[in-house]
Image: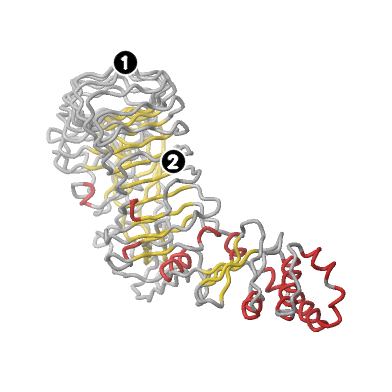
Amino acid sequence: MLGNEPKCIPQQPMDRFVPRDDGGRLVIARRNDEAIQLMQCRALNPCAFHNSLWIASFLAMTQGTGHQLERSPSTFRKQAPTMMHRYLSVLLLSIGLLADRTAAEAQTVFIPDPYTRTWLNIAKPNSVDANGDCDTAAWNAAPPSAVGFDLSSVPNGGAVDLEGIQHLKIGTLEIRDGDINNATVALQGFPLNLGQIRLIDIPSSNISGLLPLPPLSIFWCDNCDMATLPAFTGGYLWFWNNDLSAQVQSVPMDVVDLRMNSCNISNVPPLPVGLLRLEISDNPLSAWPSVPAGLLELEASRVGLNYAPANLPNGLTHLGVDGNDIPTLPPLPTSLTGLSANNNLLTSIPPLPMFMQSLYVSGNPLDSLPTLPFFMSHLSAGSCGLSALPAWSPNLTNVHLDSNAFTSFPPLPGSLGLLNLRGCAGLTCLPPLPAGMSNVWLGGTGITCLPNIPPGLNMNPVALGIQPVVCNPGTSPCPIVDPLIIGTTFVDADADGVFDAGEAARPNATVIAQPGDLLAGSDVNGNYVLPANVGSFSVTGVPLLYEPVTTAPYAVTFTGLGQVDSLNHIGFTVIPGMYDLVTSITGTNVRPGFNTGVWVNVHNVGTEPTTATVQLTFDAALSYVRAAAKCPMP
């Protein structure tokens, strides 16, 4: 054996050798055929490999001469001069090999398993050639962040060998058995720079070489049939759908994020003092655990306890206790920014901390809601029996108040983007909708029309729950509070700036009043209602692509609340002969080894009907699965 040389181990087939980075040693034999085979190796160090080839060639030529091979190249070279004249051809051969620097610099690892080759090529296209060779230098120079091994393509009871991946840099290694086909996996070694292992729907006992785990950031086990928490050096230990009830568990002390959801535990083991997040939902707990003083997040929904956890940490930022039949909550920490307590038995909510941003308390028999903090953006209190509301937070963006007993509704905050009032059967009127609102859901209410239509509102009747029409202020039973500018947007066929008899409505147009950038959209009939203020305004339409405005701006003045200025009809003319299709494409994140979705939308923004052929060219790293066409919703 020669010291300080690359090591090559024969693989199948026998004439192929794979370099191993295990200290830079090279194994050769004295048989002439083995020494010649050795010359096919690719060395980790080109210069060292040159010396090895020289000595290996010399050994092949001197077989049977009785000369002894020393352990170091330098010692060997000291003994060799007396025989050098007999073997000048060997030197010429070694010089020729050294000239081939490209071959010497390549670091090739053989991937024997065809499934592993496929998965690696999905993660990094063309990284493994048809012979199963993978250039580790090319892979490790720009490694993929994750490699997925989806065993659903492996026959039932089949075997997969991951030999070779221990030489590759892989940040996340995911092994899943989507069809639960009891495939087995041989893990010969862990990838380089490995930060995360994910096991999904595969028994961990089917993966040889998995334990003990290497140092990781995250170990993720979803239905991986582990009965105990493994020894683990890392921060994030995540378990779902495992039965951990049989043995007393020990949590590794380095863990800062522990998740044991749906693990059939009745008692939470002692927790590390540095734990920051704890998830223990969907377990039959017998008591609340003692949590570290520095815990920031606690998620414990549906754990079978009918009382709230006491002595919450002072720095807690999130508390989740959905579905526990809790009648009262303790005082909330002043640091709390999120509370989720849906489907309990709460009749009241304690005062909310001033920095709270989200409150989810649907499905509780509440008498009222507490004062909403200034920074609150998300409120969900559906099916609570509420008939009144506190003053809005000025920063609310999402509000779900479905299936409550409201008969009237206060003015909405200007920041609101989504309002869910489904099932509020006693509600017949709405206040004006904010200009930036995108969704309002009114199915199952007594509301039949909209007070106004913000320009970006989702007009789909299925989402709205009613037809997308504005109320007529002259006939609507709803009170008028703000001054209103009303009229119709129409197609000005003769471009004369006059709404003539027979000219069609122009639905879904936008009207603007200045000053203030006050905006309103027109409904399916072209009618619009634009809430305004006391003062004077100039009202016109917002020109559309290929549809300029033909009517002159209207001058409108309001001297008091509740006034209405009507007949402000706004015309648009269509420029003929414009063919213009707009194509947009969106998709989900691509994960190696798993399906990804891509949506292509084609919209005719021109003024003429037309047809088109859409061709999608996708990256060579992706393979086609299926496609379907879908007509746009009305």
Labels 2 and 1: the sequence-earlier one: 1
* Image-quadrant location for residue 411: top left
Q: Position of residue 586 (x, y in %)?
A: 41, 59
Q: Does 405 appear above or below 368?
A: below
Q: Position of residue 133 (x, y in %)?
A: 54, 72
Specify few, some or many for label 1: CA neighbours under 10 Å numbering under 14, 14-19, or 20 or more.
some
Q: Position of residue 119 (x, y in %)?
A: 43, 65
Pick the front one: 417 or 35? 35
Kind of element beneath mark 2: loop
Q: Is residue 213 left or right of residue 319?
A: right
| Contact (Cβ within 8 Å) of mark 2 with mark 1 | no
Q: Residue at x 32, y 31 (%)?
A: 299
Residue that protrudes farthest toward the front in the picture: 66
Q: Residue at x 60, y 62 (%)?
A: 20
* Image-quadrant location for residue 43: bottom right
Distance from Cα at disc 2 to Cα at disc 1: 44 Å
- Quadrant into which the N terminus falls: bottom right
Q: Name the front one of labels 2 and 1.
A: 1
Residue to which mark 1 is pinned:
331
**Residue 5 seen in the current view:** yes
Pick the front one: 346 or 524? 346
- Quadrant into which the C terminus falls: bottom left
Residue type, label 1: Pro
Residue to which mark 2 is pinned:
517
Residue type, label 2: Asp
Q: Does 258 appear above or below 226?
A: above
**Residue 486 seen in the current view:** no
Kind of element beneath mark 1: loop
Q: Residue at x 28, y 60 (%)?
A: 182
Q: Is residue 355 left or right of residue 633?
A: right
Q: Is residue 533 left or right of residue 79?
A: left
